[in-house]
Amino acid sequence: MLASSVEQAAPQKNSHPGTIIDAYQRNGILADAYAYASQTLNKGTDCPTYGSTALDSQKSSPPSGGFTFHVDIQQSGYLAVYCKQGYAPRTETANDNSTNNTRVQPDPITLYPKSLPGVSSAQVSAVAIAVDVEGLHANFSYYARSNEVAFSKAMESPRFSDEDRNIINMLLVQDQKPYSQQKLPYSPQNPPYEKWRPQERVESPAIAFGALTSDLNHVRSDFRYYAWANEGGYKEALSKFRPDVSQAIETIRTRKQPFGNPR
C-alpha cells in the first residue's frame, strides 16, 4: 500500500519534444536544454540560468538533435534555455505547458555558431535567415492552395495589421524567389532535413490564422536571436537580400508584440 501511495503521489508531467540544430549547417547537434519556472536571470554564466533550480534538463541527441522536456502539469508555462560550447546561448521565454505533447517553440531550435573556419558571420546569418524566409514562402503557399477561402478570411482578421498582411502577401509571391540566392552549405537536391513540413489541411479560417501566426512568430524569434548573437553579421547579411525582403525581415524582427497580438 505504501508503494502504491507513493506512486500515485508522483507529480504528473507534460512532455514537450523539440529539435536543436546548427543554424548554418542545419544538422542536429548535441546540446544542453533547460526548462525553468522563473523569469529571473542569474548573472555570470555563459549558459544563462533562471531562478534557483531547473524544472528539467535534457541533452539533445545527434544526428537528429531531438530531445523532450518533461514539465510538471502544475506549471502553466516555462522558460527554456539552450546551450552548447562554441555557440551563442538561446533563451525562449514563452513555452506553453497547458497541453501534453506540444512541441517547444520555435521548432526547430537553431543555435548560432560563434565561428566557422572560412565562413564569415554574415554568411552564417544570411543562410540562417534565408532558410527561414524560404520556409515562410513554402508554408504560406501551401495554406493558400489548401483552402483559398479559409486563407482569405484569415487574412481579413482584425488581429492582422495592414503591415502584417503586406508581409504575408509579399512572401506569398510564387513567380520569384523571396530571398537572395545564397551559397548554402547543402545542395538544393539535398535540403535541410528539418525543411518545414506543411501543416494539415487548412479546414477553417481559425486554423489558417493559427498557422500563419505560428510561422511568423517562429521566424520573429529566430531573427531576434540571430541579431543578438552577432549584430554585425546580421546587419551585413541583410544587404544580401532584396530591399523589400530585408525590410520585411526587419519589420518581423522588431515587432514589439508576437503576431496575433495587438501591436
Image (cartoon, helix red, strand yellow):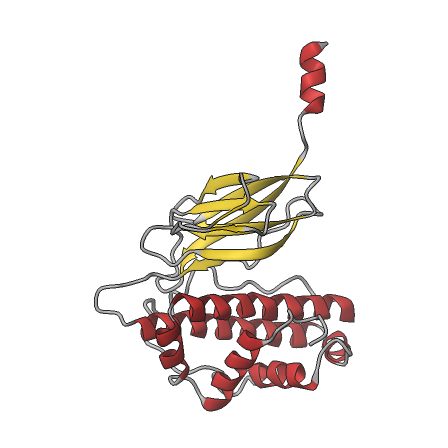
Question: Which of the two residues, 149 or 134, is positioned nearer the viewer here?
Answer: 134
Whether residue 218 appears in this view of the structure is yes
Residue beneath the point at 50% across and 75% down? 133
Residue 44 in the image: above or below residue 216: above
Name the residue rendered at 31%, 71% in the picture.
Answer: 121
92 vs 240, nearest the viewer: 92
- x then y, percent, for residue 205: 77, 71
Looking at the rendered image, the quarter that the C terminus falls into is bottom right
| Name of the residue lying farthest toward the top | 1
The location of residue 112, given as percent across then percent down, is 38, 62
Q: Quadrant of residue 169?
A: bottom right
Q: Quadrant of residue 105?
A: bottom right
Q: Nearer the viewer, residue 253 or 22?
A: 253
Name, please, the residue furthest toward the front. Answer: 43
Q: Is residue 204 visible?
A: no
Left or right: 254 as drawn, with respect to 122: right
Which residue sits at x=33%, y=75%?
122
Image coordinates of residue 231 in percent, x first then y, are 39, 73
Figure quadrant of residue 217: bottom right
Which corner quadrant holds the N terminus? top right
